[in-house]
Image (tube, rainbow, N blue to C red):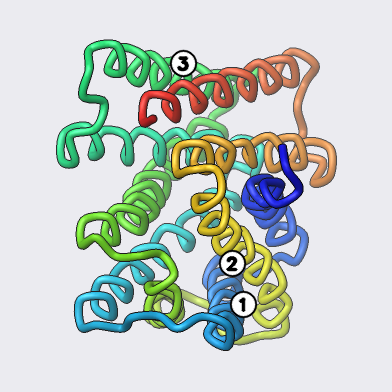
């Protein structure tokens, strides 16, 4: 791999670290997403100093909608972290993203045109789902655990829907990623602010401003993915970007000290291996 192509490793690193930093900083989900989106906006404004985007009406409106959907996804992602922990929530979220983007790619954008790619892609999705199912195993179950799992179902689905729409909307309108950066960031902040008006707690507190740092890291991964797509192709960039689940899942166990028994920890390692393997298969099916 040439020196320039090492940029492909930046998205998984950034996206794996971001959930861990958000969890460390703490705060309510509304404060976490508000800070993170402000960080993304700051980096987008910096990027505008170096690029000249084509901001047509379609780019602005679709980019804004894409960013607002991402705000919905991230708000519920942070809710899932609170309910389930990072090590359990991240594999499930990656699974939903892979399933959503892949199925829409097949049935809307007519990807996986051959029977071989269909077989490879759907086999990859099944392997990912099997890996995620392992994260639900608890050696010692209780009533509170079951109720938490049930309460997390809605946020998980909203998270998956928001993050999938974030990716699909620009593709639907044929928008270049560099053109969409600023409208997406504005949509992110606007969506996060509107969502933050609901529920208890103030959206702007000290932890909101601290969460700007994880937001900058997430946005750096987003920009790096655009560079990676140009250098190594969309398929390789997409596949490698999913590897961040390894960092966030293991970080949840070893850095955030999320409790796992020995048997549960073994299943976490198996889950990671399956999610990565399935993600690679899905990526190859898109080639």
The local crowd at label 2, few if under 14, some if 14 to 19, many if 20 or more residues have their Cα within 10 Å, is: many
Give whichever of discs 2 and 3 has the lower sequence position: 3
Q: Residue at x 52, y 35 (%)?
A: 239
**For residue 252, above or below residue 103:** below
Q: Secondary structure at mark 1?
A: helix
Q: Residue 179: in sight, yes or no? A: yes
Image location of residue 106, percent across then percent down: 22, 32
Q: CA distance from mark 1 to mark 3?
A: 35 Å
Residue that numbered label 2 is attached to = 219
- Identify the image quadrant of the C terminus: top left
Foreground label between 2 and 1: 2
In the rendered image, the vertical position of residue 67 relative to residue 186, given as above or below: above
> Between disc 2 and disc 1, whose residue precedes?
1
Distance Cα–Cα, label 2 vs label 3:
29 Å
Residue 126 lies left or right of residue 86; in this view the side is: left
Secondary structure category for the residue under label 3: helix
* Residue 127, label in figure: 3
> 93 or 256: which is nearer to us?
93
Q: Which residue is mark 1?
A: 39
Foreground of the two, 123 or 270:
123
Q: State the mark number for residue 224.
A: none
Q: Mark 3 or mark 1, which is nearer the start of the sequence? A: 1
């Amino acid at each position: 791999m040439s020196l320039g192509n090492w940029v492909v490793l930046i998205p998984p690193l950034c996206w794996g670290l971001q959930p861990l930093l958000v969890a460390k900083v703490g705060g309510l989900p509304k404060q976490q997403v508000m800070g993170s989106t402000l960080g993304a906006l700051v980096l987008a404004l910096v990027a505008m100093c170096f690029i000249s985007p084509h901001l047509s009406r379609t780019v602005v409106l679709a980019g804004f909608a894409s960013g607002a959907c991402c705000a919905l996804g991230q708000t519920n992602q942070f809710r899932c972290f609170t309910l389930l922990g990072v090590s359990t929530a991240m594999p499930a979220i990656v699974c939903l993203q892979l399933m959503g983007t892949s199925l829409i790619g097949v049935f809307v954008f007519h990807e996986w045109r051959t029977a071989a790619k269909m077989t490879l892609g759907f086999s990859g999705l099944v392997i990912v789902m099997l890996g995620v199912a392992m994260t639900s195993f608890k050696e010692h179950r209780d009533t509170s655990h079951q109720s938490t799992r049930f309460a997390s179902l809605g946020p998980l689905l909203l998270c998956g829907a928001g993050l999938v729409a974030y990716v699909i909307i620009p593709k639907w309108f044929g928008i270049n990623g560099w053109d969409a950066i600023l409208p997406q960031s504005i949509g992110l902040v606007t969506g996060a602010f509107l969502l933050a008006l609901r529920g208890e707690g103030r959206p702007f507190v000290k932890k909101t401003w601290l969460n700007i740092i994880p937001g900058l890291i997430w946005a750096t991964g987003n920009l790096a993915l655009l560079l990676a797509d140009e250098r190594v192709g969309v398929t390789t960039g997409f596949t490698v970007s999913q590897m961040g689940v390894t960092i966030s899942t293991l970080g949840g166990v070893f850095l955030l000290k999320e409790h796992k028994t020995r048997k549960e920890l073994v299943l976490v390692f198996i889950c990671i291996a399956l999610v990565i393997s399935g993600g690679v298969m899905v990526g190859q099916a898109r080639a």
